Amino acid sequence: MAGEFDLIARYFNWPAQGEGVSLSVGDDAALLSVKAQHQLAISVDTLVSGVHFPVNTHPADIGHKALSVNVSDMAAMGAEPRWFTLALTLPEYNTAWLEGFSAGLKQAADDYGVDLIGGDTTRGSQTITVQIMGEVTPAAALKRSAAKLGDVIFVTGTLGDAAAGLALAQGDSSIYASGEKRAYHDYCIQRLNRPTARTVESRIIRQYAHACIDVSDGLLQDLMHVLKASQCGAVINTDDIPFSEALSSLHPPEQCLQYALTGGDDYELLFTVPDDQCDGFIKAMSEQQLSCQAIGYITDDAEQIINQYSHLLTATGFQHF
Ligand code: ADP
Ligand code: MG
């Protein structure tokens, strides 16, 4: 048992920096204060080795990603991320792994300005669960169910990079070239292993958008969640889906599109903005040099997205319909 407490003290106990933490790691529970007029937003995500990341992923990347994917949920909710807990199941006390993991996690905590306020540590097959807590005013919360007829559909950043990175990380050597393409490969793998939660973008998006979701399972599947919750349809102009220079240099357009539509792990935000708010929104984003791209609009025909893309869904082996 001494080992467990030593492990927590050594790797997962650093001073809280934010407000709102009265009591952190070390007691039976943490004590937190939520700001007046705000609601507590809570979400949890588990990463299983070999399922959510390749088994040979660097521990610092795992630590960083475990927090980033959770912070991404806060960004998608329009919430300000504040605190997190960590439930860690490990097969052994591996100091090299723990050092790397802890460093990556701490780096992400600093990047996003969130505090580790507790957790649980057990022995077993490697599983990493992070629960994130954030604050949001009821008016700013970006629900999946809030898309409205005529809203313009936007995405942040670029899509498809992480899926291309996964193909590389899984050793698809047919597309792993040396020389000049190496930088593009590294970029896509970096996008897989070190996703950036779009917290900065979220602060602007929450002032303009109706509905929002983070793209973790591919554009189509995540868009479908919004459409289903909002009981509407959508038209997507596939020519407008943003690809990185790396992705479009490595792959023909159809392959880029397949990665973007049905790949996962991009952690960009997809959201809908009322038509008459778009000019103000685009201006606010560009003033902060934040990238976003309109890719379509919301319709009142709930069948529309499925009909329009049924050929692509079959062609790409997308199984959900
Ligand atoms: P309890 O027996 O009350 O559940 P634990 O022995 O599980 O307490 O944990 C002791 C303290 O260490 C608690 O404050 C808990 O939140 C914290 N803790 C345990 N594991 C971790 C971890 N992996 N990361 C951060 N804090 C942790
Ligand atoms: Mg416990």
Image: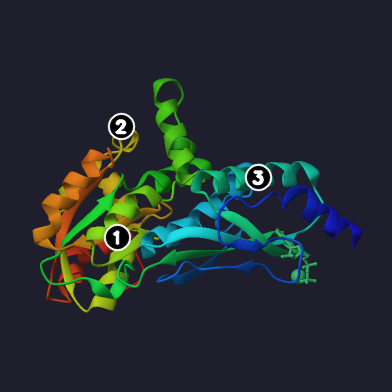
- Please, is residue 51 above or below residue 169 in the view? below
Disc number for residue 249? 2
Place residue 143 in its image quadrant.
Answer: bottom left
Q: Secondary structure at mark 3?
A: helix
- Rendered location of residue 144, percent (x, y): 31, 71
Query: For the view shown, which residue lies furthest in the front direction?
Result: 36
Q: Is residue 164 left or right of residue 225?
A: right
User: Which residue type does callout 1 highlight?
Assistant: Arg
Q: Within 8 Å: ligand 1 and the Cβ of disc 1?
A: no
Task: Name the residue that disc number 3 marks.
Answer: 59
Q: Secondary structure at mark 1?
A: helix
User: Which residue type does callout 3 highlight?
Assistant: Pro
Q: Secondary structure at mark 2?
A: helix
The residue that appears at 12% across and 76% down in the rendered structure is: 301
**Disc 3 versus disc 2: nearer the observer:** 3
Query: For the view shown, which residue lies furthest in the top direction?
Result: 179
Q: Are marks 3 and 2 in contact (CB under 8 Å)?
A: no
User: Which residue type does callout 2 highlight?
Assistant: Ser
Task: Name the residue that disc number 1 marks.
Answer: 206
Q: Which quarter of the rendering shows the N terminus?
A: bottom right
